Image (cartoon, helix red, strand yellow):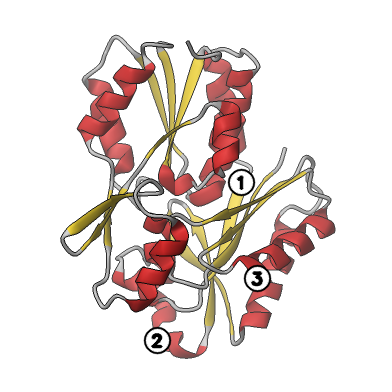
């Protein structure tokens, strides 16, 4: 039996570190990476390090797809053996069909109390929304209290990422409001965020060093004056740079928690090798 009365479900793009997932009993439903004739469950069938090595060298570009309605239905049924209260936290419905699959599966199971939150963001920004709910669930809170915690957290999260290139985001079709950067993409290091559910331009600089400084300064500004700041370093096969940015940001803002996570293959397929980012949460 689950120790929690409320089960929290996230999709694999949240990239919550595995040890944290285990600590709070979070359920992760993987998206799928399609590479030529092969398919891989995100974060299950291929490690992030193997994925980025293959991405650099394989002329075939991978595509991604959301979990199916049947996969969500199967997970809901499995969880209902332990609890009838399921809170699902997804990445932006503008970026993936994951939300739609979750909603359709819910409609097939009217006897299970399923609530779904579209975070309108992605990666650990969405992960922090799930963690807020999961902390409530672990403390024995009700479904309503977990939903409230998630919605409050959703108002106080953000994410910034710098890419080595816009190529992967463009090829993956998720470029959103950052498309205007493409004209000068060869000579810039773009800074991107997710705003109102889609990828948006948050700045551009000429060098990697300036891009990392831009991240540090922007994150520091974003959480200035806030309390209980939590930060997560994000990277796509670029741990050293991500650790540097995370350490500098943590010192600057007095973070109460700092996590590091490598972006999963499904996210990495759009970010491309070399991506570095910071996600944050505050009270």
- The residue wearing badge 3 is 241
Query: Compared to 227, does 137 lie above or below?
Result: above
Residue 171 lies in what quarter of the image? bottom left
| Mark 3 closeness class: few <14, some 14–19, many ≥20 residues within 10 Å | many
Q: CA distance from mark 2 to mark 1?
A: 30 Å
Q: Residue at x 43, y 55 (%)?
A: 47
Q: Are marks 1 and 3 in contact (CB under 8 Å)?
A: no
Q: Is residue 279 left or right of residue 195?
A: right
Query: Which mark is on residue 157?
Result: 1
Query: Compared to 50, does 153 lie above or below?
Result: above
Q: Residue at x 43, y 70 (%)?
A: 272
Q: Earlier in the sequence, mark 3 or mark 2?
A: 2
Query: Compared to 32, does 163 lie above or below?
Result: below
Does dot 2 land on a helix, a strand or a loop?
helix
Say if residue 154 shows up in the picture.
no
Q: Nearer the viewer, mark 1 or mark 3?
A: 3
Query: Compared to 269, does 15 lie above or below?
Result: above
Q: CA distance from mark 1 to mark 3?
A: 22 Å
Q: Nearer the viewer, mark 3 or mark 2?
A: 3
Q: Is residue 170 left or right of residue 150?
A: left
Does dot 3 land on a helix, a strand or a loop?
helix
Q: Nearer the viewer, residue 240 or 101?
A: 240
Q: How far across and how far down the image is residue 94, in percent? A: 35, 50
- The residue wearing badge 2 is 183
Q: Residue at x 30, y 32 (%)?
A: 102
Q: CA distance from mark 3 to mark 2?
A: 26 Å
Q: Residue at x 25, y 16 (%)?
A: 109
Q: Nearer the viewer, residue 77 or 141?
A: 77
Q: Are marks 2 and 1 in contact (CB under 8 Å)?
A: no
Q: How far across and how far down the image is residue 31, in percent? A: 33, 46
């Amino acid at each position: 039996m689950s120790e929690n009365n409320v089960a929290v479900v996230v999709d694999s793009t949240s990239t919550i570190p595995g040890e944290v997932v285990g600590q709070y009993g979070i359920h992760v439903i993987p998206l799928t990476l399609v590479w030529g004739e092969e398919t891989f469950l995100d974060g299950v069938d291929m490690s992030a390090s193997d994925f980025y090595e293959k991405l650099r060298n394989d002329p075939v570009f991978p595509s991604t797809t959301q979990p199916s309605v049947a996969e969500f239905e199967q997970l809901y049924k499995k969880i209902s053996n332990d609890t009838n209260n399921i809170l699902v936290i997804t990445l932006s419905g503008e970026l993936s069909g994951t939300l739609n699959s979750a909603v359709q599966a819910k409609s097939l199971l009217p006897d299970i109390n399923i609530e779904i939150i579209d975070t309108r963001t992605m990666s650990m920004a969405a992960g922090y929304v799930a963690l807020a709910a999961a902390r409530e669930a672990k403390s024995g809170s009700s479904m309503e209290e977990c939903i409230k915690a998630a919605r409050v957290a959703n108002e106080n999260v953000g994410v910034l990422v710098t890419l080595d290139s816009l190529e992967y985001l463009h090829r993956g079709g998720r470029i959103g409001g950052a498309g205007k950067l493409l004209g000068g993409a060869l000579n810039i290091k773009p800074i991107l965020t997710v705003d109102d559910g889609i990828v948006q331009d948050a700045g551009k600089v000429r060098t990697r060093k300036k891009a990392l400084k831009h991240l540090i300064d922007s994150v520091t500004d974003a959480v200035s004056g806030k309390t209980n700041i939590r930060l997560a370093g994000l990277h796509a096969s670029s741990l050293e740079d991500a650790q540097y940015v995370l350490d500098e940001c943590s010192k600057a803002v007095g973070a109460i928690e700092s996590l590091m996570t490598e972006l999963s293959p499904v996210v990495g397929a759009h970010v491309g090798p070399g991506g570095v980012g910071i996600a944050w949460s505050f009270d």
